[in-house]
């Protein structure tokens, strides 16, 4: 369950970052992910939430690095 929560959290961040480019069906999917995330949260222990937070921090650091280095290219020259 904690793995699913982490997976959803990552999807929500990625989709939210490009929300204006999502189709209507993708926006509905994002809403459903948020609802599922909230439902899962109630069944997780404090240790699960700490694990999720730790793993999410690792992932988010890499995610931001990729966004800035790959997708936001600095001007040349």
Image: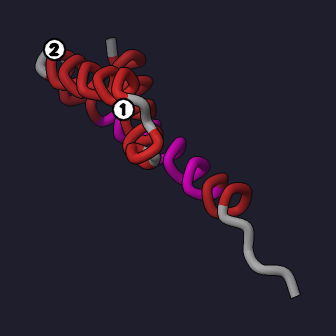
* Side of 20 where 50 appears, left or right: left
Q: Could you say where residue 31 lies in the image, as x and y percent from the top left? A: 24, 26
The numbered dot on residue 45 is: none
Among the 4 quarters of the image, the one containing residue 48: top left
* Side of 4 where 60 appears, left or right: right
Residue that appears at 57% across and 48% down: 63
Question: Which residue of the protein is positioned furthest toward the right in this rendering?
Answer: 77
* Side of 74 where 17 appears, left or right: left
Q: Relative to residue 41, is residue 50 depicted above or below?
A: below
> Is 69 within the magenta?
no
The numbered dot on residue 43 is: 2
Residue that appears at 52% across and 45% down: 58
Q: Could you say where residue 15 lies in the image, as x and y percent from the top left? A: 43, 37
Q: Relative to residue 26, is residue 64 depicted above or below?
A: below
Badge 1 or badge 2: first in the primary sequence = 1
Circle 2 SS class: loop
> Most prominent secondary structure in the magenta stretch?
helix
Residue 51 visible, this angle: yes
Q: Mark 1 and mark 2: span between their CA atoms?
A: 15 Å
Residue 54 visible, this angle: no
Q: Which residues are magenta?
A: 50-65
Among the 4 quarters of the image, the one containing residue 36: top left
Residue that appears at 53% across and 42% down: 59
> Is 64 within the magenta?
yes
Q: Could you say where residue 75 lies in the image, as x and y percent from the top left? A: 77, 79
The numbered dot on residue 9 is: 1
Label 2: how many residues lie within 10 Å, few (<14), some (14-19) or many (20+)?
Answer: few
- Quarter of the picture holding the N terminus: top left
Circle 1 SS class: helix
Residues at marks 1 and 2 touching, judged by CB atoms closer than 8 Å: no
Q: Nearer the viewer, mark 1 or mark 2?
A: 1
């Amino acid at each position: 369950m904690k793995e699913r929560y982490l997976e959803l959290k990552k999807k929500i961040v990625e989709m939210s970052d490009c929300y204006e480019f999502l189709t209507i069906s993708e926006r509905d999917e994002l809403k459903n992910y948020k609802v599922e995330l909230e439902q899962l949260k109630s069944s997780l222990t404090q240790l699960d939430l700490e694990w999720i937070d730790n793993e999410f921090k690792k992932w988010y650091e890499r995610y931001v690095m990729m966004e800035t280095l790959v997708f936001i290219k600095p001007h040349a020259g």
